[in-house]
Image: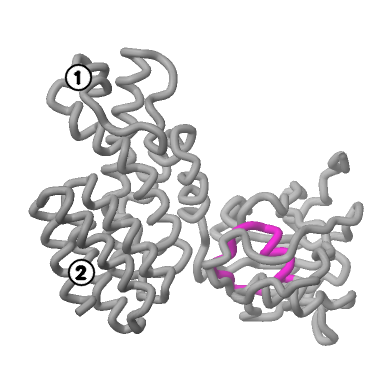
Amino acid sequence: MFEQTCAELTRAAIDRDDERAFGRLLRKVHQAATVVPVAELTAGVRLLAQGVAEAPLDYAASLAVMSGMIVENGADADAPGTAVMGRLLEVTTGALTFADAWAKAAGGEPPDPAEHQPSREVWDVVRPGLGDGAGPAMEAWWSLPRFALAASTVLSVSPMVRASVPDRETLAAAVDRAEDHCGQLTYVRDLLRVLDGERLLVLDRASGRGWTVVIGGIGDNFQLHTLLAGELIRPDRLPGQAPDPRWVASSLDQDVPPGTPAVTGQWNLVDVDGEWIWNEGVPADIPEVGGTRVVVLDPPPYERSWNPGRRFPQMPASLFVEAAHDPASLQAWWQRVRPATTRPTG
């Protein structure tokens, strides 16, 4: 029954049926999605993915949001995620076209999609500059917040979707430009930079030892720092106070239990050139040296603490040690590593 309703909704979107029929089916799917089993949710959302990919943007945007909600309820994200990311560049560039035309014609920020509906008055502003493209650009502008919300969900949940984003560099550039117009794109921007299956070389300056670690699904360097401590501070690796298990678990895939204290930083993370690796950054910020991202562990210059958990709670993370290296095998690397630079603490 749920699958059949999703099929009807998809067909209504592609055929651009009247809004009342489409809205009725959309509400019916929304209500059913809270009670049907996960297997049925997945079958239904795979049908909605066709609508996301093929329907006019306004209808597709509503299906994208609905698909994101169904994914949050447990459905597999790969099919709808592929469809959402397959159209995000179209939506973003169209919205930028609208914003640019509005700025030239009227100045200032275009109408907020959360507060205004498309109208003849808006069309009259951008029509002289866009001609026949005014309608599609308006549709993209009003669709962008919904596509950005759905993209945040599917990128958080699915490593496959993150790995298979089409035209990634072009999309990232468009998202960077459009971020000022749509705050949700900040999350999309950072999710596009998440590394999966990435190897890091981690060097401990005090002992000269090192480890190759493999990371995935890490949203920021606070999380990276916490997970490195969980893997490396143990009797056979590095000395120190082992992190609270709740810190590590909530940095991987668990919720933060009530009463969990703030995480205490163990090191100062720097790169090969001695530049600080800021916790506020992301692993993709760490420079590559000969194709390898290198993290050097130094003593902390001052005490740091931060809230436990993950920036993207829906995104499970991983970090494990793939190989250990003794100082003798790392001589070439240590010759390249510079002392840490001095930074203000304020």
The image quadrant where one finds the C terminus is top right
| Quadrant of the rendered image containing residue 204 | bottom right
Question: Going by the image, does 36 lie left or right of 14?
Answer: right
Q: Residue 28 — which label?
A: none
Residue 332 shows up from this direction: no
Mark 1 lies on a secondary structure that is helix
Mark 2 lies on a secondary structure that is helix
| Quadrant of the rendered image containing residue 125 | top left
Please say which color scheme the image uses.
one colour
Q: Which of the two discs, 2 and 1, labels the residue nearer the N terminus? A: 2
Callout in the foreground (2, 1): 2
- Judging by the rendered image, the residue that carries numbered circle 2 is 6
Q: Hey, what amino acid is under mark 1?
A: Arg
Q: Is residue 267 magenta?
A: no
How crowded is the residue under tag 2: few (<14 C-alpha within 10 Å), some, or many (20+)?
A: many
Q: Is residue 214 magenta?
A: yes
Q: Residue at x 73, y 68 (%)?
A: 226
Question: Going by the image, does 165 lie left or right of 334?
Answer: left
Residue 301 shows up from this direction: yes
Q: Position of residue 268 (x, y in %)?
A: 81, 57
Q: Position of residue 200 (x, y in %)?
A: 62, 66
Q: Which residues are magenta?
A: 212-228
Q: Nearer the viewer, residue 216 or 178?
A: 178
Q: Residue at x 57, y 65 (%)?
A: 313
Q: Position of residue 33 (x, y in %)?
A: 33, 72
Is residue 75 placed above or below 48 in the rendered structure? below
Q: Nearer the viewer, residue 174 or 340?
A: 174
Q: Nearer the viewer, residue 3 or 43?
A: 3
Q: How far apart are the alpha carbons under marks 2 and 1? A: 36 Å
Is residue 214 placed above or below 312 in the rendered structure? below
Q: Hey, what amino acid is under mark 2?
A: Cys
Q: Residue 127 — which label?
A: 1
